[in-house]
């Protein structure tokens, strides 16, 4: 079953063509990595998939909904209900505990539930740090709080932007292990990364260059530049 489909997606900022004719399909339960050099269009693609921006042309379907035609308010609702976002910079509220930071996501979705939030922290190995402020947590622990926050509303899609970019090797491995477990449980994951070691755990990798899909890596095998209208992933 397809969870996400991009059809002929382009994004233009003035004279800059950030994305050019992107065609991509992601199935429910897949783990996809998006890679490419700076300026290749990774962030733009993430923003469109994550309902934080709209394409200049083309169509995006997420869980059967044409999100490219939705209003900004509706995109906010779709993002809240269907997408769990994980950022490189964590974006935790400094004066809230780890537990409260997770519960903030519940507040905007439905009703805060402390037990559910504790369960989410337990899934990432942080139930014992629930009452700690971000300043009392290591970078790896803060990122795991972000993952718990992303999971709390049972999203259809987990979208992570450079989730290990600020972590040392030990914490990077811990975060990747969590993604492995989530994938084994059936979660759909898209990771934007510059790190080949992070991408290699994905089932497939899309490599962007100059706003286009340059190639697709699957299980260590590379396909050439995108020649078909649609890159099936």
Image (cartoon, helix red, strand yellow):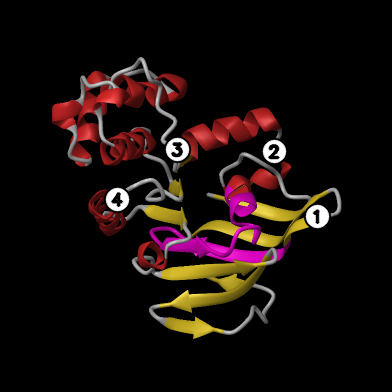
Position in image of residue 184 (x %, y %): 26, 59
* Disc 3: which residue: 89
* Disc 4: which residue: 168
Q: Is residue 15 above or below residue 126?
A: below
Tell me the CA gap for discs 1 and 3.
26 Å
Contact check, label 2 and label 1, Cβ < 8 Å = no
Q: Earlier in the sequence, mark 4 or mark 2?
A: 2
Callout 4: few (<14), some (14-19), or many (20+) C-alpha neighbours within 10 Å?
Answer: few
* Residue appearing at x 78%, y 58% in the figure: 17
Callout 3: few (<14), some (14-19), or many (20+) C-alpha neighbours within 10 Å?
Answer: some
Asked if residue 191 lies left or right of residue 114, the reply is: right
Callout 1 secondary element: strand
Callout 3 secondary element: loop
Q: Of 134 and 1, which appears nearest the observer?
A: 134
Q: Which mark is residue 70?
A: 2
Q: Which mark's residue is nearer the viewer, 3 or 2?
A: 3
Q: Earlier in the sequence, mark 2 or mark 1?
A: 1
Q: Of 8 and 215, which appears nearest the observer?
A: 215
Contact check, label 3 and label 2, Cβ < 8 Å = no
* Disc 1: which residue: 16
The answer to whether residue 100 is magenta is no
Q: Which mark's residue is nearer the viewer, 4 or 3?
A: 4
Q: Residue 195 falls in which quadrant of the image? A: bottom left
Tell me the CA gap for discs 1 and 4.
35 Å
Position in image of residue 31 (x %, y %): 40, 61
Q: Is residue 69 above or below residue 8?
A: above
Tell me the CA gap for discs 2 and 1.
24 Å
Tell me the CA gap for discs 4 and 3.
14 Å
């Amino acid at each position: 079953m397809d969870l996400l489909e991009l059809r002929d997606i382009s994004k233009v900022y003035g004279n800059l063509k950030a994305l050019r004719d992107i065609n991509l399909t992601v199935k429910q339960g897949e783990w996809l990595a998006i890679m490419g050099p700076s300026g290749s269009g990774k962030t733009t693609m993430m923003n469109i998939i994550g309902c934080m921006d709209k394409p200049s042309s083309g169509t995006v379907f997420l869980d059967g909904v044409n999100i490219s035609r939705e209003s900004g308010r509706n995109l906010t609702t779709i993002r809240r209900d269907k997408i769990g976002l994980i950022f490189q910079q964590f974006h935790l509220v400094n004066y809230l505990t780890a537990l409260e930071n997770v519960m903030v996501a519940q507040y905007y979705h439905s009703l805060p539930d402390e037990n559910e939030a504790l369960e989410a922290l337990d899934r990432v190995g942080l139930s014992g740090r629930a009452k700690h402020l971000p300043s009392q947590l290591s970078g790896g622990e803060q990122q795991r709080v972000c993952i718990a926050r992303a999971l709390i509303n049972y999203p259809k899609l987990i979208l992570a932007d450079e989730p290990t970019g600020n972590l040392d090797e030990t914490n990077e491995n811990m975060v990747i292990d969590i993604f492995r477990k989530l994938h084994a449980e059936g979660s759909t994951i898209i990771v934007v990364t510059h790190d080949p070691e992070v991408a290699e755990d994905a089932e497939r990798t899309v490599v962007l260059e100059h706003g286009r899909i340059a190639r697709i890596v699957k299980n260590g095998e590379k396909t050439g530049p995108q020649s078909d209208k649609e890159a099936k992933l």
